[in-house]
Image (spheres, rainbow, N blue to C red):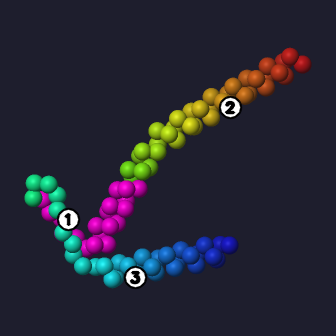
Amino acid sequence: MRYLSWLFGFALFLLALGFAVKNSDTVVVNYYLGYQWQAPMVLVLLVFLIAGVAIGVAASLGFIFRQRREIFFLKREMRARAQAVKSDE
C-alpha cells in the first residue's frame, strides 16, 4: 500500500509539473484602482489555491473548536456518571 501511495504521489507530481511547464505564460491580474499583477499563470493559480485553502480552514475552525469543546464536556459528564454509578454499588 505504501508503494501505491508513493506511485500516486509521483504521478500527481508529474502531472503538476507538466501543467506548470505548459502554462508558464505571463498573465495580468487586474485589481481595483488600476493596480495590476503580472506573474506566470502557475504562480497565480498556486497563490489563489493556497488562499482558498486558508480561507476554507479558517472558516471551519470555529466548528471544529465547538465540536472539541462539546466532546470534552460530554466525556467529563460520562466520567462523572460512571463514578456516580460506581459509588452507588
Q: Which residue is mark 3?
A: 18
- Magenta residues span 35-53
Image location of residue 31, percent across then percent down: 17, 58
The residue where tag 1 is placed is 29
Where does the image place residue 68, in percent across and percent down from the top left?
57, 37
Q: Which quadrant of the rendered structure holds the C terminus?
A: top right
Q: Quadrant of the N terminus?
A: bottom right
Name, please, the residue furthest toward the right.
89
Q: Which residue is mark 2?
A: 75
Residue 86 image-quadrant placement = top right
- With respect to residue 75, does 21 lie above or below? below
Q: Earlier in the sequence, mark 3 or mark 1?
A: 3
Per the rendering, the mark at residue 81 is none
Kind of residue at disc 1: Val
Q: Residue at x 42, y 76 (%)?
A: 16
Q: Residues within 10 Å of mark 2 (few under 14, many from 20)?
A: few
The residue mark sitting in front, 2 or 3, is: 3
